């Protein structure tokens, strides 16, 4: 009896590892950075508000808070792209002392799911570095490479524009 319990536990653990491996194989990530020649406080001042993405990112026409208040956990924003697409996101963590916040997409026409992202500003010798990173999955019918290319393109457009704005 004891031996069969041990075998069952080992088989169960092995199946869990296989399932976790399959999940991990589908998890994608993107990390983009930009070096800025301004103090981290200045970069943070530009990007810190959850309702102001449209003020520094060229793809977005507006940001509207639809639930919650400002930079508090659980606040929900709806981003509208310049072509009219709407993306709903929820603020998961806001850390002003660390110049960082994390959010997740809850509704979107984008071909990705399970998207969680963090934007962070850190000091550097020449000013600061803004890092935008995420993990997500490609929706069925979208290749991993296409999903990564899309997210990388959004990040690059925003970070390049931030650099131009903060010269």
Image (tube, rainbow, N blue to C red):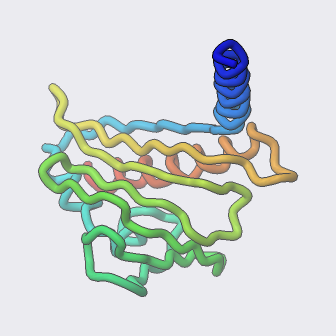
**Residue 136, position in %: x, y?**
60, 47
Task: State whether residue 8 is above or below residue 138.
Answer: above
Residue at (38%, 83%) from the top-left corner?
65
Q: Relative to residue 143, is residue 50 drawn left or right?
A: left
Q: Quadrant of residue 131?
A: top left
Q: Position of residue 15 (x, y in %)?
A: 73, 27
- At horizontal 26% and vertical 50% (from top left) the residue drawn is 100
Image quarter hosting the N terminus: top right
- Residue nearest the observer in this picture, 43 or 136: 136
Residue occupying the far bottom of the picture: 66
Determine the residue positioned at 60% across, 54% down: 114
Would residue 139 be found to the left or right of residue 24 on screen? right
Residue depicted at x 16% and y 45% = 40
Query: Of all residues shown, which one is farthest toward the front?
Result: 1
- Determine the residue located farthest toward the right in the rendered image: 141
Q: Nearer the viewer, residue 37 or 138?
A: 138
Res. 107 image quadrant: bottom right
Residue 110 versus residue 128: which sits nearer the camera? 110
Q: Where residue 26 appears, x then y in whole percent? A: 71, 37
Residue 63: percent from left, percent from top: 43, 78
33 vs 114, left or right, is: left
- Number of labels in the image equals 0
Task: Please say if 73 is above or below 157.
Answer: below
């Amino acid at each position: 009896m004891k031996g069969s319990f041990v075998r069952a536990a080992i088989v169960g653990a092995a199946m869990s590892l296989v399932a976790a491996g399959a999940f991990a194989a589908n998890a994608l990530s993107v990390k983009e950075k930009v070096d800025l020649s301004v103090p981290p406080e200045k970069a943070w001042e530009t990007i810190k508000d959850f309702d102001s993405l449209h003020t520094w990112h060229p793809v977005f026409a507006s940001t509207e808070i639809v639930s919650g208040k400002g930079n508090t956990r659980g606040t929900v924003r709806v981003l509208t792209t310049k072509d009219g697409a709407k993306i709903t996101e929820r603020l998961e963590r806001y850390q002003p002392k660390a110049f960082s916040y994390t959010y997740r997409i809850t509704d979107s026409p984008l071909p990705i799911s399970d998207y969680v992202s963090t934007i962070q500003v850190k000091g550097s010798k020449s000013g600061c570095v803004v890092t935008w990173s995420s993990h997500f999955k490609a929706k069925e019918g979208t290749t991993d490479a296409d999903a990564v290319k899309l997210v990388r393109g959004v990040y690059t457009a925003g970070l390049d524009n931030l650099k131009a704005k903060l010269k």
